[in-house]
Amino acid sequence: MIAALIGKEIKENVFSKKSLWIYFAVTLLFSGLALSFVSVKELSLLAQVEVNMTFMKVVLGISILVTIIIGSNMYAGERERETLESLLLSPLSKAQITFGKIVGLLLFWFIISLISLPYFFALSMGTDIFVKALVFLYLICFPLVIGFAALSLGFSAILSSTKSSTLLSFVLFLVTAIPMFLSTTMKKSGFAHIVDTVSPLSRSMLTLKDYFVNRLGFTVLMVDLLPVLVFLILSIALLLFANNKITLKGGE
């Protein structure tokens, strides 16, 4: 039964027409960015490490955004289509239903990550950066993506509207991204410093720099990633709480 649910999620969210258009749009975006690195004079002067770091930031940002879009629709969309009741009345438990949805969501991200690999390979030609990009993408970015997947799915389970869950997920994503738009001076004090310290997205960018440029060891990278791991735990806790709140007819 759980296999049937995962198959349903894959059909509806991984290989749907909307998802195929997203894959196509992502491919065009990656192609345009990679072409810019080799054809625009100013960008072509960047070192391969900087090029791959920039591309990694784009891949991570796009991955999180599309994960939010799909995840925010999973439960709220079931309510809007009036199919949630039949799903809850099936022999599957709420935990199994949520597990099936999270598997479909992560498979969606995995396909986007696969689309990015040929570009990383081309941009890192002649160096060992490609292997480092694989490690960063699948070991360090993965907890962050799971966190936002659980967050958006949790909001989708609690809220009755796809628009509301998507908007709330986007707002939290933007809050975590604020330090990326601030100068180094601004991030050294006040509220900006607090956000920069606890933001999982900001800390993942610090990890990216320490891994690719500073070549720091595993222990330092794990310290960098502490806010990401805390975010992951809190997001999973929210999802578990939301899972218990799911009721027939949205709790009405």
Image (cartoon, rainbow, N blue to C red):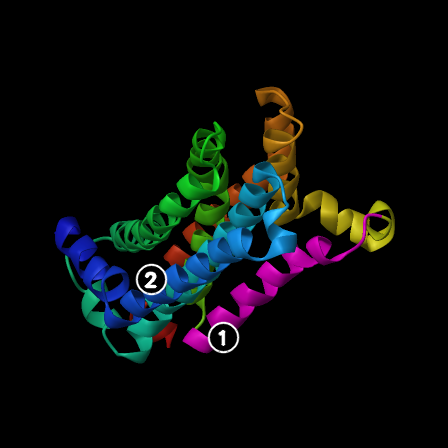
Quarter holding the C terminus is: bottom left
Q: Are marks 1 and 2 in contact (CB under 8 Å)?
A: no
**Labelled disc at residue 61:** none
Tell me residue 134's x, y (percent).
42, 35
Classified by dominant secondary structure, the portion drawn in magenta counts as helix
Tell me residue 91's x, y (percent).
15, 56
- Amino acid type indicated by mark 2: Tyr
Magenta stretch: includes residue 179: yes
* Mark 1 or mark 2, whichever is nearer to me: 2
Tell me residue 249's x, y (percent).
31, 75
| Residue on which the image places disc 1 | 164
| Residue on which the image places disc 2 | 23
The residue depicted at 50 percent of the width and 36 percent of the height is 140
Q: Is residue 112 visible?
A: yes
Whether residue 94 sits left or right of residue 170 in the image: it is: left
Label 1: state its secondary structure.
helix
Depth order, front residue of 158/118: 118
Q: Which residues are magenta?
A: 161-184
Crowd class of label 1 (few under 14; some 14 to 19; many from 20; radius 10 Å) = some
Label 2: state its secondary structure.
helix
Tell me residue 151's x, y (percent).
48, 56
Crowd class of label 2 (few under 14; some 14 to 19; many from 20; radius 10 Å) = some
Magenta stretch: includes residue 39: no
